[in-house]
Amino acid sequence: MYKVMLFIDGTWLYRTLPRLAEQSGKSEFKIDYGVLPQVVARELADRLGVDPAGIDVVRNHIFASLPTNYDHLDEGLITRQNEFYKLLREDYHYETELFNIDFRGRRVRQADRDPGDSFQPREKCVDIALASKMLYQAAMPFGMDIAAAVLGDRDFTPVLQTVRQLSKRVMLVSVRSSCAQELADPEDRERVKDYDTLWMDDHIEELELRYEPQWLECQSPEHVGDRAFQTTYRPRRGEPVYCDACRAAYAQRRVTSVSTSIYQEDEEIDYGPQAGMPVIGETLEGVVEFKKEDKGYGFVTTDDGVSFFFHLSDLEGLDFETLEEGREVIFEVKTLPVGGKAGAAQDVRPIDYQDEEPLED
């Protein structure tokens, strides 16, 4: 049994996504982090000439940076990034090591900053952390036999050489257009690997995160009939799921009862101007402006200032308890604002659910 550990340079991997998207003929590309270790294990078994059952991926490490001290307008972006790493830890059991980057109050994406602002965020510790962890595991007896290094920067040449000097084997996992020549060299004159490089380019279809239809069981106690229903939604581990009919029925009951009482609250809520009214069924983007913890409802407001009421049963891919004011979401218009009162939203969900990648400037 060969024990394998993955060491992923998350910042580098994120930078390669546009090139993988270009090769796949799509506008964007997202990696299925549950499939990645499986592909590595299978391809490594093929290179070793053993049965895939003889490969045990004992640990997956990912190293990346996380913005801090950023403009409050980017709160939604950072929240989604944190949820992405939480997903890796809880659902896929990755070991995540994150290091802060001080943005000094600026926007995270360069395109959102003043064109005259020459500020460049400085990433610290990511490369050193990956190298340190790999060396530590290589030096530990019985820790691992093979290090699968998912990276492409030349800076890792010394650590890969040292890991091999410690009698551990190395397989490089990279992308052709994003891999340093010294690492990609088929003759391996730098002596950094023990096997042919595993090019992710050759496994694009398998590595792409897809939302394929799947059958789930509705967990609503009021469900009638067969509980099986088909959906492309991927629930988090342990998250209850409900069919569309049960969600709609529950939401309707709650909207009817809550809508008659929310305007009797002592506090007044400014719903903003109601110009530029959308149409029922239209999908909009907005920000969670207000959340009533003890009542289980809130309001989302579009850039035009139009406000919509939502109940916790209208959330999809979001947890009401952890939902923060200022969170960016998308939703469908259920009813329109009337007489100065907010409209109603349904299918309130993250702009990109589950598959957020590390942010890069």
Image (spheres, helix red, strand yellow):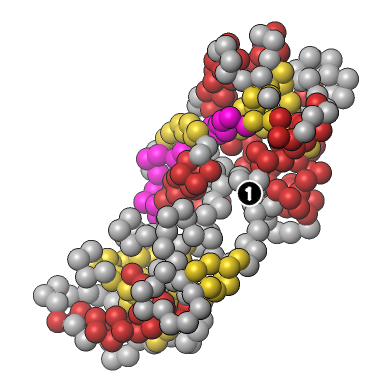
Closer-to-camera residue (95/190): 95
Q: Residue at x 53, y 43 (%)?
A: 92
Closer-to-camera residue (74/89): 89
> With 205 as the anchor, is 219 left or right in this view?
left
**Which image quarter: residue 175?**
top right
Q: Is residue 214 above or below residue 336?
A: above
**Which image quarter: residue 199?**
top right
Give x and y (percent) for residue 103: 43, 39
**Which image quarter: residue 315?**
bottom left
Most common SS among magenta residues: strand
Q: Is residue 24 above or below residue 223?
A: above
Give x and y (percent) for residue 197: 80, 30
Residue beneath disc 1: 32
Q: Residue at x 49, y 69 (%)?
A: 217
Magenta-drawn stretch contains 48:
no
Which image quadrant: the C terminus?
top right
Stretch in magenta = 57-76
> With 206 as the anchor, is 264 left or right in this view?
left
- Amino acid, disc 1: Asp
Instruction: Specify whether residue 117 is in view.
Output: no
Q: Residue at x 21, y 86 (%)?
A: 260
Q: Residue furthest right?
A: 187
